[in-house]
Image (cartoon, grey):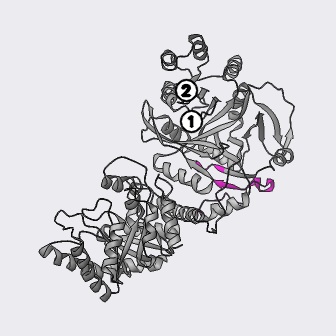
Amino acid sequence: MRTSIATVSVSGTLEQKLTAIAAAGYDSVEIFETDLLSCAASPRQIAGQLDDLGLTCALYQPFRDFEGMPGDLRQRAFDRAERKFDVMGELGTDRILFCSNCSPQSLGEQERIVDDFRALGERAAARGVLVGYEALAWGRHVYDHRQVWEIVKAVDHPSIGILLDSFHSLSRDIPNETLAEIDPNKIVFVQLADAPLLSMDLLFWSRHFRCMPGQGDLPVAGFVAELLKLGYDGPLSLEIFNDRFRAGSTALVAQDGLRSLVAVHDQAERLIGRRSPLPPPAQIGGVEFIEFAASDEEARRLEPLFTGLGFAKIGQHRSKQVDRWRQGTINLVVNREQRGFAHSYEVVHGASICALGLTVQNPDATLRRARALGIQRYDEGTPRKSAGMPALRGVGGSLIYLLREGATDRIWTDEFRPLPSNDDDAGLDKIDHVAASVDIDEFLSWQLYWTALFDVAKQVELEIPDPAGLVQSRAIEGSDGAFRMTMNASGGRGTLSSRFIGNVFGAGFQHIAFTTTDIFATARKLAEKDVAMLAIPGNYYEDLIARFGLDPDLVAEMAAHNILFDRDDAGHEYWQIYTRAFDKRFFFEIIERRGAYAGYGAANAPIRLGAQSRYRAEPDPR
């Protein structure tokens, strides 16, 4: 696969864009006309920079309002085309995008349009140029790639072909199967873009909300799969119009783009049963452990919280200041080392969740896939190398350890010395989900990280009201439910997710949810141990009685223990309680799912956020 990206997709000057695109590893680039016109360097100088960077110019774009123009406007369109051919010669590219006409002066008769492109083909042939005709989804007369294909067939000129853009086709719900009608030899170029499903004007949707394949909701992999079945072997290029991308990190967006191309091409090959050079996305068997970085003082203050939650300290690392806490199948690791990764993480972020240990069937294959996706492996000098625990960099610089499924017992027996412990658990059984808070500009980036590397799927994105603004929240889940995480981000500086990022100097994991089979028994146990729980206002419980018809005595007990409740349309239930945050950093949720409740209590999230916001003014306990 040859890769490309339009310069409009990233921020910066043209020179900065090209440097970032080359550093990310693309083969070529589309030069967007506005970037060139606003650049002080000449087209020949830009061509020289491309050569120095190891890039080629795959396409020059866009040429607007060409076909179907009346009178003098027709001649002016041909004159403009000749000038653009001159620029292309200086840039060193032989392909140009002609998008379907949007001018109110254009005429829609197909015979006229065919004649225009046939005449253009003669001019293009004389200059060694290939013209790719693209159907804009909002074109005045031509807005469907099937229309373009009929026109290209009628033109029947070797210099005129079709240019396909996934957004323009998928935004109009044009079936991917219709691509099978196209001769692959007449496909001049292919552009890819995804987008969230939104109900709005097509032009506005396209200009502001496009995103990388895999970051949105459109079936882009199916689009690519149809092209591969056809035999298309040209470049796959990204053309992304996104307000945040154009204001964000040039390097990050460029890297995400290449990752998305690798992932969508791999997914497309698998859809058509073709062997992919990449190992398949790794299925996560579960979260084997959660690691906390803490100083000795912070670890001492964590101990009563863990004990109160029913965890027992059952192991001490044989050579390091690392403690193992356990309850049910949950393992919490507290790293108090004075050197190494966890120490550095604690120095920067304070007491924090610094790593997750995930089980996968083949860690080596997962590492190979990560490398192909440009995901950074943690330094091979990691102290955990001897324990067979390779790691990848994750959210906020945290680590994702990869453990071989079925072989984790050896880590605990070989690495940890057992400690005597009292069995005084609180009924916690397993890890239900983890939750991360990230910067709003990295929200899509981290979703792509997880969905490209692992066999997980995004759920419907939610907007959750926080007293200080809206929080975007999206769940990412394995198909078997063994792994669940929620990702949160907000543009409001005062929201909980934004305050977390400010408090810990970066993104990271903010809360962990544990399961219990008896929420009331667990809540009573935590009350006996004086665990500081999040107080829920009484108004919430008055509403519960009206909303769900719950027994008032039951609701009174729920209120006494600050238990939240939700029920889905099928009658399945979700019960939840929250601890107060440790040092205003991370907190714990305890849940009971009854029946097949699949969500995360989204209806209760505004209540929880409101309750947490009331503690903002309290002094930091540190």
Residue that numbered label 1 is attached to: 599
Q: Amino acid at mark 1?
A: Gly
Q: Nearer the viewer, residue 296 or 512?
A: 512
- Determine if the magenta segment contains residue 447: no
Q: Is residue 487 above or below residue 600?
A: below
Q: Is residue 383 magenta?
A: yes
The percent coordinates of residue 580 (x first, y second) are 59, 27
Left or right position of 169 against 616: left
Of residues 278 and 347, the one drawn nearer to the viewer in this rendering: 278
Q: Can see residue 42?
A: no
Q: In this rendered view, identify the residue nearer to me: 252 or 143.
A: 143
Q: What residue sits right under mark 2 in the picture?
A: 566
Image height check: is 273 above or below 609? below
Q: Position of residue 77 (x, y in %)?
A: 20, 75
Give how far apart the Cα atoms at labels 2 and 1 are. Answer: 9 Å
Mark 2 nearby-residue class (10 Å; few <14, some 14–19, many ≥20): many
Q: Marks 1 and 2: in contact by CB < 8 Å?
A: yes
Which residues are the magenta region?
373-399
Residue at left offset 45%, top offset 62%:
176
Going by the image, does 137 lie left or right of 534? left
Q: In which image quadrant can residue 246 be found?
A: bottom left
Please identify the quarter of the rendering in which residue 595 is found.
top right
* Residue at x 37%, y 81% (from the top left corner): 94
The quadrant of the rendering that contains the N terminus is bottom right
Residue 574 position by quadrant: top right
